[in-house]
């Protein structure tokens, strides 16, 4: 699914969303990297109950540890990795939203004379974790109906942000339909999978994957899109 119509977040923030009489029966853990993302998610959720939101730090290791620590303390029905991300050209534009249909550790493996071999190809484990497909589709559908630009596709987790066109091309060759790149999804998903809890990843696009130009990142717009996506979660997950 790919719909590039502009989002109208104001239209989504209905009284029904904020004051839903249908609190989610599910208990949901949302893990962001930094506080600015956490605050955007909390603004979107409004007064909805059943959601815990934590900022687990940047990168897969920090967020895996934070997610695992939380999962030991509380029993959850769903875990969500959420935050801003880089979008792959032709798949996800700045300010749009990507819902992961797979969470892929794109740089976990080994360089060889013939190129990159994933941890899976090396026989040391898995480089991808399946999401809760039904909920991912439901959320993407709800965003689409609300007029948001949304892509359902693979979200890559990297430990080093891509900074050149050549590196971006290498990733696309590895995962041809990659929609977005961020740094936490696989860590959150690994902790969730170890606890047997379904996982989702929601990313709003702040920049395009490719040559690094941090001054061009549209963080404010991406945080607004993250707020919009979060505002639909109480209805989608109830
Ligand atoms: O400076 C700020 O105000 C600010 C507000 C919210 C978030 C940030 C971050 O820098 C978050 C870092 C986070 O962003 C993800 N990200 C975003 N773009 C990319 C990318 O092109 N490649 C990889 N990761 C990206 C990532 O998940 C970082 O953890 C700053």
Image (tube, helix red, strand yellow):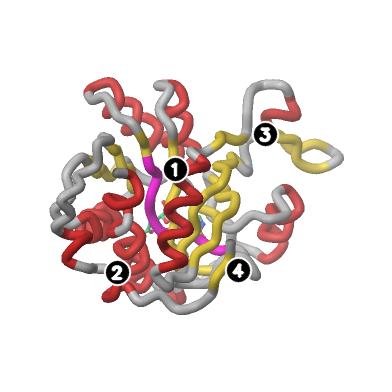
**Disc 3 to disc 4, C-alpha distance:** 23 Å
Left or right placement of residue 20 versus residue 64 in this view: left
If you read the primary sequence from the N terminus, does the residue marked by circle 3 or circle 4 appear first?
3
Q: Is residue 223 visible?
A: yes
**Disc 1 to disc 4, C-alpha distance:** 28 Å
Secondary structure of residue under mark 4: loop
The residue at the far front in this view is 21
Q: Residues within 10 Å of mark 3 (few under 14, many from 20)?
A: some
If you read the primary sequence from the N terminus, does the residue marked by circle 1 or circle 4 appear first?
1
Q: Position of residue 26 (x, y in %)?
A: 28, 35
Label 1 or label 2, whichever lies nearer to me, is: 2
Q: Which mark is residue 12?
A: 2
Dots 1, 3 in contact, CB < 8 A: no
Instruction: Examine the structure image and report whether residue 146 is included in the region drawn in magenta.
Output: no
Secondary structure of residue under mark 3: strand
Task: Report the front residue among 15 and 117.
Answer: 15
Secondary structure of residue under mark 1: strand
* Total numbered circles: 4
Quarter of the C terminus within the rendering: top left
Q: Residues within 10 Å of mark 2 (few under 14, many from 20)?
A: some
Dots 2, 4 in contact, CB < 8 A: no
Q: Which contiguous range is marked in magenta?
A: 80-87
Left or right placement of residue 216 versus residue 113 in this view: left
Secondary structure of residue under mark 2: helix
Q: Position of residue 82 (x, y in %)?
A: 38, 50
Residue marked by disc 3: 109
Quarter of the N terminus within the rendering: bottom right
If you read the primary sequence from the N terminus, does the residue marked by circle 3 or circle 2 appear first?
2
Dots 1, 2 in contact, CB < 8 A: no
Label 3 or label 2, whichever lies nearer to me, is: 2
Residue marked by disc 4: 211
Residue marked by disc 1: 200
């Amino acid at each position: 699914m790919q719909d590039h119509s502009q989002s109208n977040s104001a239209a989504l923030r209905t009284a029904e969303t904020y004051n839903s009489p249908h609190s989610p029966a599910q208990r949901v853990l949302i893990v962001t990297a930094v506080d600015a993302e956490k605050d955007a998610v909390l603004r979107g959720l409004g007064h909805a109950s059943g959601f815990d939101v934590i900022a687990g730090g940047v990168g897969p290791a920090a967020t895996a540890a934070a997610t695992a620590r939380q999962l030991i303390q509380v029993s959850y029905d769903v875990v969500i990795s959420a935050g801003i991300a880089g979008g792959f050209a032709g798949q996800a534009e700045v300010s749009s939203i990507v819902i992961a249909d797979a969470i892929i550790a794109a740089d976990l493996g080994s360089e060889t004379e013939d190129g990159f071999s994933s941890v899976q190809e090396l026989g040391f484990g898995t480089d991808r974790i399946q999401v809760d497909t039904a909920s991912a589709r439901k959320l993407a559908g709800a965003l689409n109906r609300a007029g948001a630009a949304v892509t359902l596709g693979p979200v890559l987790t990297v430990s080093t942000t891509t900074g050149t066109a050549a590196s971006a091309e290498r990733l696309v060759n590895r995962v041809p339909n990659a929609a977005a790149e961020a740094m936490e999804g696989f860590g959150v998903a690994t902790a969730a999978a170890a606890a047997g809890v379904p996982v989702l990843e929601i990313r709003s696009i702040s920049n395009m994957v490719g040559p690094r130009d941090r001054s061009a990142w549209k963080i404010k717009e991406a945080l607004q899109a993250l707020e919009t996506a979060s505002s639909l979660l109480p209805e989608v997950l109830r």
